[in-house]
Image (cartoon, rainbow, N blue to C red):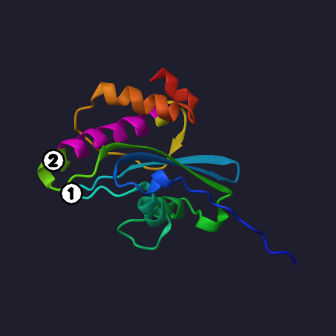
Amino acid sequence: MSIPLHTLSLPGGMLERGFWLYVWDIQVGGERLLYVGRTGDEGNPQASAPYDRFGQHLGRNKNANALRRNLLARGIDLPQVDHYDFHFVGPIFPETADMESHIPYRDIVAALEKKLADCLSEAGYCVLNKISCRRPLQQEYWLKIRDAFEQVFPELKDF
């Protein structure tokens, strides 16, 4: 019996703290599922690196593993997944030292997260999570985010 070798390659930039947007792109049983997220906490001036969220989403901490919970709700156990891709854009803004400077960045990225999830859904992708956000969208940032993610999700070009 041979034991399979697996390789995961991480870019160094994935360790930079700040405000990022990301999309989990999951292939399981011929189905493509997406999960949209961001870094930049709501209640404190923390803005983690994508690497941190990557691990948390697959972990067992109920307060941080939203991807795991969404998959389990669909009857999918993590090892059943054929393939995980993690696409991330940023940092859009740097991490800040206090809430006063954190809030404007957080609000911009939260609106971008909602727009990204909504547009992916409207383009026909199966997005696992729904984003609630009433913060105003800043179109100039959206165009940059759309252009970046369009490399992986070409149907975004129409949004």
| 101 w.r.t. 141: above or below | below
Answer left or right for 90 relative to 26.
left
The part of the chain drawn in magenta is 104-119
- Find disc 1 in the rendering and name its residue: 45
Answer left or right for 43 relative to 68.
left
User: What secondary structure is the magenta-colored segment mainly?
Assistant: helix
Q: Quadrant of the C terminus?
A: top left
Other-residue count near label 2 (Cα within 10 Å), few / some / many at <14 / 14–19 / ≥20: few
Mark 2 or mark 1, earlier in chain: 1
Q: Give the residue drawn at x 70%, y 48%.
A: 30
User: What is the distance, in whole Å, between disc 2 and disc 1 at their CAs?
Assistant: 8 Å
Disc 2 is placed on an element classified as helix
| 47 w.r.t. 131: above or below | below
Q: Is residue 60 magenta?
A: no
Q: 10 or 147: nearer the eye?
A: 10
Answer left or right for 17 relative to 134.
right
The kind of residue tagged 2 is Ser
The kind of residue tagged 1 is Pro
Q: Give the residue drawn at x 64%, y 60%.
A: 81
Q: Quadrant of the N terminus?
A: bottom right
Whole-percent x, y for residue 48 in the image: 34, 58
Q: Point out the residue furthest to the bottom here.
A: 1
Say whether marks 2 and 1 touch (CB < 8 Å). yes
Whole-percent x, y for residue 115 in the image: 37, 35
